[in-house]
Amino acid sequence: MLADRQILLIIGGGIAAYKSLDLIRRLRERGAGVVPVLTRAGQEFVTPLTVSALAGRKVFQDLFDLTDEAEMGHIELSRAADLVVVAPATADLMAKMAGGHANDLASTLLMATDKRVLIAPAMNVRMWDHPATQRNLATLRGDGILIVGPDEGVMACGEFGPGRMAEVPQIIAAIEGALSAGPLAGRHVLVTSGPTHEPIDPVRYIANRSSGAQGTAIAAALRDLGARVSFVTGPASVPPPAGVEVVRVETAAEMLKAVEAALPADAAVFAAAVADWRVSNAAGQKMKKDGAGGLPALEFAENPDILATVSRMSEGRPKLVVGFAAETHDVERHATEKRARKGCDWIVANDVSPGTGIMGGTENAVTLITAEGPEAWPRLSKDETARRLAARIASALG
Ligand code: CTP
């Protein structure tokens, strides 16, 4: 599996850098080529000579090394590989990645690459547990960065806990996983997400409380299984995931247009909380109080139902159409009826009754309604719910 694959290996400055020397050997034993990059801090732990001797080629160290630029520019270097691996990934390197810094060769390569990135964090347990590192970790996960480890155990500094770099066989397994084509490779999946904004006048609009968190997590999980994802999003409060094609819209009508333009797709997931109505007499200018106490008379028109429109397409309908239902009571019954009414294949129903904390929260408890009937899933994080749904979509598409 690793034969003839090229790994760009960035070695950060941590005591675990000694394990990366073994990693180079084991990768080469399996037929992979290793292009090594050593950060300035990394050079304090292992020498460029050792790294290049093991890799069997020159080690790259400096962004402004003109010979390197003449031989191979940093953009090319970052893209010629099949996978970028950062081992050890120090707290500092993770912070740079999360912050989008590009002030040395390693961080510039990580910003410029169009390949998947796998990091093997290694640091003192307190540094790992620090809110800043955990915040950066969450950001990196959201950006689609793959993470292996860290392990728990006695550390070089004498403390005990999570922070020790994963062992070489574990890193090799993660590299193999990252290089294997996911079950959705070659598939195109469309995802709608977020709320819509329906204007009342140029400064006011009707909206809802959807954060876009579940739709974003679903798009990321589908991407992680290898799908090409078109992500049509209303004005959500969470940023869209990296590595998907983002189309930003405001209104339901714009969302329908964007969805139609993104088709054909193998599957479509409609996670957006689309406004059912729009203001049909929206004003072209800001509405003013008339001073006489008169209230504006808003008139409403029904918005197109995007899920039903796509579900009922006679030509080019995605093989699998998945809708969502937000219910506060009789969840199964309402969602089963909704599935039939809209003509979609599956409905992901969530109980959004006030005490659940689901709307706007980080967890979800869903019931999946398919032709076979309802299936209650346990209460899970929105990320885990998304991963389960993505795996189900992959097996349904076969
Ligand atoms: N949907 C859509 N276009 C609309 C309205 C809804 O695509 N104009 C989709 C949503 O993305 C979601 C599902 O339809 O997948 C939800 O249907 P909806 O009828 O809006 O259900 P609820 O919001 O659960 O509302 P209600 O209880 O009013 O039926």
Image: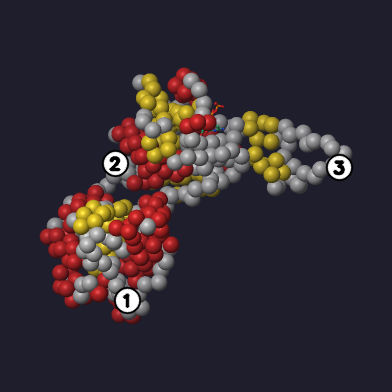
Q: Secondary structure at mark 3?
A: loop
- Give the label on residue 291, or none: 3
The amino acid type, in three-letter code, at marker 1 is Asp
Q: Secondary structure at mark 2?
A: loop
Q: Residue furthest right?
A: 292
Which residue is nearer to you in this view: 140 or 344?
140
Cα–Cα gap, marks 1 and 2? 38 Å
- Give the label on residue 183, or none: 2
Q: How is the image coloured?
A: secondary structure
Residue 151 in view of the camera: no
Cα–Cα gap, marks 1 and 3? 68 Å
Give the x, y percent position of residue 38: 27, 71
Judge whether 178 appears above or below 208 on screen.
below
Q: Which comes before the other along the chain, label 1 or label 2?
A: 1
Q: Residue at x 47, y 40 (%)?
A: 361
Q: Residues within 10 Å of mark 1 (few under 14, many from 20)?
A: some
Residue located beneath label 1 in the image: 62
Classify residue 323 as left or right of residue 83: right
Q: Which comes before the other along the chain, label 2 or label 3?
A: 2
Q: Which comes before the other along the chain, label 1 or label 3?
A: 1
The amino acid type, in three-letter code, at marker 3 is Gly
